[in-house]
Image (cartoon, rainbow, N blue to C red):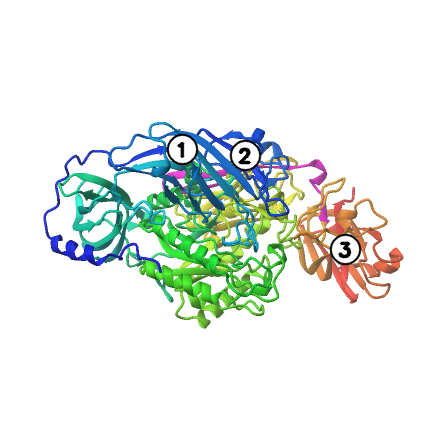
C-alpha cells in the first residue's frame, strides 16, 4: 500500500521528534553552503530511431550511421498539420513522424568529483513510454511511467573524474498483449503518445544524508494546510530522510514558512535517528501566525516553505525550498467548489501539453504562454488532461492562481487484448505507480485541487470505432477505480478523488456507473456536437444531480470543432461533420454560446471546463482544415489564432475590457447584407460601418451584441466596434470585402452550413424559416470515404447536391426593386408524383404543382425555374408550400432584373 506524503512517520521518528519538539531551533553552521549540486544534461545527445520491433518480436540493432545530434527535451514524433496556409506553419505532410517503437539516446558526461560519501542521481522529468538506462555498460534502472519524474542512483556505476557513457533506450510502442509495453496503461484515447526524453534531464549530487531523492520522484518533503482560522492556520508536515552513509545519523529537521519579505510566519523542529543504509520518515505540525492566504487568481500569494536538515554538530547538510500557498479547498455537492471558505466556481479548459512548434518537448516558456492565453480568456482553472503534466505548468499555476485538476493516464481502456475481462496485475501496478508519482511530485502545489484517476472508462461496448474495435465484453472498471481511489485517499486525505465520465444517462447500454467510485465527478458531454442539442444539457445535468445528490458534479468537457478559415453565413444552415471536414468557425462559436446558456448560473457545478484550450495532435482525425489535429481548441495548435469562441468566454468570464468583432477571418463576403456580432463586456458598445454610426447597444444577451441586416458596400468595408471602460476606450476593427458581383445579388446554396465552390460565389444557407437540410451525398469522416452522387444537367454539382426540404420560406433582405429569381431543383430519391409543391413570391403563387422528378425525367437531374417579382417592403418573401410530400430547393439566385 502507498504512504501518505503528509502524514506517514515511523515510531522511532515519533518518539524522538516528540521529545525534542519544544527545543530551540538549531543554529545552522554554514547555512549558506551549497548542500546539493545539479548539472543539466540538455545538450550533447545523439539519437537513433530504430523504429518498431520486427515481426518476430526481436529488436533490430541501431544503424551505426543513423545517429543524429539532438538536445533534450526531445521527441522523435511530430504529429498534426493544417491543410491551409502551409507556409505559415511548421508541420506539414512531409515532416510529420508518427513512428511508435524504439529510439536510443546516447551521450557522455564528466563525472563530478564527490566529497566523502556523496551520492549521484540521474533525474529524468519524463520519458515515454518506457525507459531503460545504462551508465558505462551497467544497467542502472528502468521506468514504465510515461509521464512522471524518476531518479536513479548511479553513484556506483560512475567513473569518478572521467568521461562516462550514458545510454537510454526509449520505447513508445502502443501497448498490446505480449508486446514490449504490455504492462503500461494503454491509453486508448483521442490523442497520440509520443516517444522520447521529452522533459529535462539532470545529474544531482547529494550529501550522503539527505531528503529522499528516491521517493517516487517527489521532493521528499511534504506539507498541506490542515486548517485555517481567523489570523491563524496549521500545516501538516512530513519528510523522508535517506542515510546512505555507513553510520547512523542523529539529525534535526527545521521546517520554516517564510513570507516574501523574509519574516518567518511559522516554524517547527523535529529530531530523528536514521540507521545506516536506511530511510526514515518524520512528521509534525506547524502553527502559523496570520498567514497571507493563497487566494486563486485574486491573490496567488506564495510563501517559501524551507526544510533544513542538520547533523548532530548543528551543521546544515541538506535544504529543500518549496513555493507554498496556504489555502483550504473543499467541494460541496449542492454549492460547488470553495476556496478558503468562499464559493469559487472553477472555470477553464482542458489542456494537452503539445504545441506545433515543439510537440511534447515543450519549454517552460511555451507552457507559460499557453497558461497566460487561458488566463487572459478569464479562466481560473485548467484540467490537465489526460496524464500527468510536467513541473512547469504546476509552478506557473501556483504563481497565477490557476486551480488544477491533475490526473493519471487511465483513458477509455485498461486492458490490452480484445474482450479481455481480467485486469492484468501488471497494469494495475502501473496505474498505481502513475498515481503514486502524480501525488508525490505535485503534493506541495497550492494550485492542485483534485486527483483524477480516470477519463471515460465507462464507454464500454459503446466505445466509438475510431478508438479501436468496440469490445463485446469488457472488464468491470469498478475494482480498478476503487483500488485507485483508496490509494489516493491514503496518500492525500485532503484532496478529493475525481474522474470524468462520458456516458451515464446517455441512453447507452451496459454503462458502468463509475461516479460511485469517487468523491466528485466530471461529466464529458457534447450536446449539439456528437449528439442532441445544446438545450438538452441542462436537463441532463439535473438528471445526474438527482441520481447522485451526494456526489459533487462538474462539467469536465464540452466542445465543438472549428476551422478558423472555414466560414458560414448561418451555423444552422446545414449539417456540420463531427468527424470530417465541414466544421466552420461560426458553428463552434454558436455551440459555445448555446452550451454556456445552459451552464451559466449553475452554482451547483463545482467546475466547468470546455474542451479544449488549444487544437492538439492526434492520429484518428481528418477534420476541418487539418489532418491529425483535434480542432476543438479555442486557439490553434501554434497558439497564433484565437477563434471567436475564445473571445466569447473572455467577454463573459473576464473583467478585462473586451470588444471583439466576430467573423474577422470571413473576409470575402458572400452576401451584401449581414448581421454583425460583437463580444463585449462593456455597458454600451458602439458600431460604425464605413464611418457611418449605427445605434449603440447595451445589456447584450450573454455579452454578444448583434446589429441585424447591416448592408455592406462594394469593395472594402471597415467595421469598427468601440466601447468605453472608465477612462479607457477599447475598439476592434475588421475589414471585409464585397465583390461587385455580390453587391446586389443573393446566391444561396440551400442546405449547407459552408457553401460549395462555383464559378460565382454562393453563400451558405440562410434567410430561411423552417425546413430541414439534406444532401444527395453520403458523408465520410471517421475513416469512411464520402460517396458523392452524380447529378446530370448542371455544371454546379457541389452546389446543387445539398437541399432544403419540408414546408419552409426564405425572407431575403434584398431592398426594394424588381428581381429575377432562379431556383434549381434536384430530386434525390422520389419518383414522379411523390413530391409536389408550390412556390410563392411576395405572397403570389408563382410556380404551381412543381414535380421535380416529373420535370427532370427522373432523380438526380437538375432543373431550373426563373421568374421575376417586385419587392416593395425591402424583404423578398419566398414560400415553398407542400402539396404532396415535402417541398425542396437546392439553390436560389436573386439578382436585380435589369
Tell me the SS state at disc 3.
Answer: loop
Q: Which residue is mark 3?
A: 776
Q: Which residues are magenta?
A: 722-748
Q: Nearer the viewer, residue 729 or 784?
A: 784
Q: Is 742 covered by the magenta stretch?
A: yes
- State whether the magenta stretch is mostly helix, strand or loop: strand
> Residue 299: percent from the left, percent from the top?
30, 47
> Residue 757's quadrant in the figure?
top right
The local secondary structure at tag 1 comes to loop
Residue bearing mark 2: 48
Q: Earlier in the sequence, mark 3 or mark 2?
A: 2
Q: In x, y percent, where is residue 211?
A: 26, 45
Q: Which residue is mark 1?
A: 41
Mark 2 Cα-neighbour bin, 10 Å: few <14, some 14–19, many ≥20: many
Query: In the displayed structure, does residue 308 sit left or right of residue 617?
Result: left
Nearer the observer: mark 1 or 3; the answer is: 1
Question: CA–CA distance between discs 1 and 3?
Answer: 60 Å
Judge depth for marks 3 and 2 and give the one in front: 2
Q: Earlier in the sequence, mark 1 or mark 3?
A: 1
Q: How far is mark 3 from mark 2, CA to CA?
A: 51 Å
Q: Is residue 456 located in the magenta-colored stretch of the structure?
A: no
In three-dimensional space, the C-alpha distance between marks 2 and 1, rounded to whole angstroms, equals 18 Å
Using residue 608 as the reference point, say whether residue 52 is left or right of it.
right
Q: Is residue 542 above or below residue 814?
A: below
**Circle 2 — which element?**
strand
Amino acid at each position: 500500500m502507498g504512504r501518505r506524503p503528509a502524514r506517514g512517520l515511523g515510531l522511532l521518528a515519533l518518539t524522538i521528534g516528540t521529545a525534542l519538539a519544544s527545543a530551540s531551533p538549531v543554529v545552522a553552521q554554514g547555512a549558506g553552503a551549497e548542500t546539493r549540486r545539479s548539472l543539466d544534461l540538455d545538450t550533447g545527445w545523439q539519437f537513433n530511431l530504430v523504429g518498431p520491433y520486427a515481426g518476430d518480436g526481436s529488436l533490430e540493432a541501431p544503424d551505426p550511421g543513423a545517429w543524429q545530434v539532438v538536445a533534450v527535451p526531445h521527441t522523435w514524433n511530430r504529429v498534426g498539420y493544417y491543410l491551409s496556409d502551409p507556409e505559415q506553419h511548421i508541420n506539414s505532410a512531409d515532416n510529420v513522424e508518427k513512428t511508435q517503437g524504439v529510439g536510443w539516446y546516447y551521450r557522455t558526461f564528466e563525472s563530478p568529483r564527490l566529497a566523502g560519501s556523496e551520492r549521484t542521481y540521474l533525474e529524468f522529468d519524463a520519458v515515454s513510454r518506457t525507459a531503460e538506462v545504462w551508465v558505462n555498460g551497467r544497467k542502472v534502472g528502468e521506468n514504465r511511467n510515461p509521464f512522471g519524474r524518476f531518479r536513479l542512483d548511479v553513484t556506483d556505476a560512475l567513473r569518478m573524474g572521467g568521461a562516462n557513457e550514458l545510454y537510454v533506450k526509449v520505447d513508445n510502442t502502443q501497448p498490446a498483449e505480449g508486446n514490449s509495453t504490455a504492462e503500461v496503461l494503454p491509453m486508448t484515447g483521442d490523442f497520440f503518445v509520443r516517444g522520447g526524453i521529452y522533459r529535462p534531464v539532470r545529474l544531482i549530487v547529494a550529501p550522503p544524508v539527505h531528503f529522499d531523492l528516491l521517493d517516487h520522484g517527489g521532493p521528499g518533503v511534504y506539507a498541506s494546510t490542515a486548517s485555517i482560522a481567523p489570523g491563524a492556520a496549521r500545516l501538516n508536515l512530513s519528510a523522508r530522510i535517506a542515510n546512505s552513509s555507513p553510520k547512523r545519523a542523529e539529525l534535526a529537521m527545521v521546517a520554516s514558512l517564510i513570507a516574501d519579505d523574509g519574516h518567518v510566519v511559522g516554524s517547527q523542529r523535529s529530531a530523528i535517528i536514521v540507521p545506516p543504509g536506511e530511510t526514515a520518515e518524520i512528521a509534525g505540525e506547524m502553527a502559523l501566525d496570520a498567514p497571507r492566504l493563497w487566494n486563486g487568481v485574486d491573490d496567488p500569494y506564495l510563501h517559501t516553505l524551507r526544510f533544513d536538515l542538520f547533523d548532530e554538530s548543528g551543521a546544515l547538510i541538506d535544504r529543500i525550498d518549496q513555493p507554498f500557498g496556504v489555502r483550504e479547498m473543499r467541494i460541496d455537492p449542492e454549492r460547488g467548489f470553495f476556496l478558503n471558505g468562499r464559493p469559487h466556481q472553477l472555470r477553464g479548459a482542458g489542456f494537452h501539453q503539445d504545441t506545433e512548434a515543439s510537440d511534447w518537448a515543450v519549454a517552460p516558456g511555451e507552457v507559460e504562454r499557453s497558461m497566460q492565453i487561458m488566463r487572459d480568456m478569464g479562466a481560473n482553472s485548467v484540467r490537465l488532461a489526460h496524464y500527468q503534466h510536467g513541473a512547469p505548468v504546476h509552478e506557473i499555476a501556483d504563481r497565477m492562481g490557476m486551480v488544477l485538476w491533475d490526473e493519471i493516464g487511465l483513458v477509455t481502456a485498461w486492458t490490452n487484448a480484445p474482450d479481455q475481462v481480467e485486469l492484468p496485475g501488471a497494469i494495475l501496478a502501473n496505474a498505481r505507480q502513475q498515481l503514486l508519482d502524480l501525488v508525490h511530485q505535485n503534493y506541495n502545489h497550492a494550485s492542485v485541487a483534485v486527483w483524477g484517476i480516470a477519463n471515460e472508462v465507462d464507454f464500454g461496448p459503446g466505445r466509438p470505432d475510431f478508438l479501436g474495435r468496440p469490445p463485446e465484453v469488457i472488464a468491470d472498471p469498478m475494482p480498478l477505480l476503487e483500488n485507485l481511489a483508496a490509494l489516493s485517499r491514503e496518500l492525500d486525505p485532503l484532496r478529493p478523488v475525481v474522474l470524468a465520465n462520458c456516458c451515464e444517462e446517455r441512453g447507452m447500454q451496459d454503462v458502468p456507473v463509475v461516479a460511485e467510485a469517487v468523491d466528485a465527478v466530471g461529466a464529458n458531454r457534447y450536446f449539439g456536437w456528437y449528439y442532441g442539442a445544446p438545450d438538452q444539457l441542462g436537463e441532463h445535468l439535473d438528471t445526474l444531480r438527482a441520481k447522485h445528490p451526494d456526489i459533487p458534479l462538474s462539467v469536465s468537457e464540452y466542445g465543438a470543432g472549428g476551422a478558423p478559415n472555414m466560414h458560414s453565413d448561418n451555423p444552422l444552415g446545414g449539417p456540420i461533420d463531427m468527424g470530417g471536414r465541414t466544421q466552420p468557425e461560426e458553428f463552434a462559436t454558436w455551440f459555445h454560446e448555446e452550451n454556456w446558456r445552459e451552464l451559466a448560473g449553475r452554482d451547483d457545478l463545482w467546475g466547468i471546463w470546455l474542451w479544449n484550450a488549444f487544437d492538439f495532435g492526434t492520429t484518428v482525425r481528418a477534420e476541418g482544415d487539418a489532418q491529425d489535429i483535434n480542432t476543438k481548441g479555442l486557439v490553434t495548435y501554434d497558439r497564433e489564432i484565437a477563434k471567436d469562441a475564445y473571445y466569447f468566454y473572455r467577454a463573459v468570464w473576464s473583467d478585462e475590457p473586451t470588444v471583439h468583432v466576430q467573423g474577422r477571418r470571413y473576409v470575402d463576403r458572400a452576401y451584401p447584407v449581414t448581421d454583425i456580432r460583437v463580444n463585449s463586456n462593456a455597458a454600451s458598445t458602439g458600431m460604425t460601418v464605413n464611418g457611418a454610426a449605427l445605434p449603440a447597444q447595451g445589456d447584450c444577451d450573454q455579452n454578444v451584441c448583434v446589429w441585424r441586416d447591416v448592408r455592406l458596400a462594394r469593395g472594402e468595408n471597415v467595421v469598427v466596434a468601440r466601447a468605453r471602460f472608465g477612462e479607457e476606450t477599447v475598439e476592434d476593427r475588421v475589414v471585409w470585402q464585397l465583390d461587385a458581383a455580390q453587391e446586389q445579388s443573393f446566391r444561396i446554396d440551400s442546405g449547407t452550413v459552408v457553401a460549395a465552390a462555383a464559378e460565382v460565389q454562393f453563400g451558405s444557407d440562410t434567410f430561411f424559416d423552417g425546413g430541414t437540410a439534406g444532401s444527395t451525398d453520403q458523408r465520410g469522416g471517421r475513416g469512411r470515404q464520402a460517396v458523392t452522387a452524380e447529378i446530370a444537367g448542371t455544371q454546379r454539382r457541389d452546389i446543387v447536391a445539398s437541399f432544403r426540404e419540408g414546408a419552409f420560406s426564405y425572407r431575403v433582405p434584398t431592398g426594394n426593386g424588381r428581381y429575377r429569381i432562379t431556383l434549381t431543383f434536384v430530386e434525390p430519391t422520389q419518383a414522379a408524383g411523390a413530391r409536389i409543391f408550390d412556390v410563392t413570391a411576395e405572397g403570389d403563387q408563382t410556380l404551381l404543382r412543381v414535380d421535380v422528378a416529373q420535370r427532370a425525367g427522373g432523380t438526380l437531374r437538375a432543373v431550373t425555374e426563373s421568374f421575376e417579382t417586385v419587392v416593395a417592403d425591402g424583404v423578398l418573401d419566398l414560400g415553398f408550400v407542400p402539396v404532396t410530400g415535402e417541398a425542396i430547393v437546392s439553390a436560389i439566385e436573386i439578382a436585380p432584373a435589369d
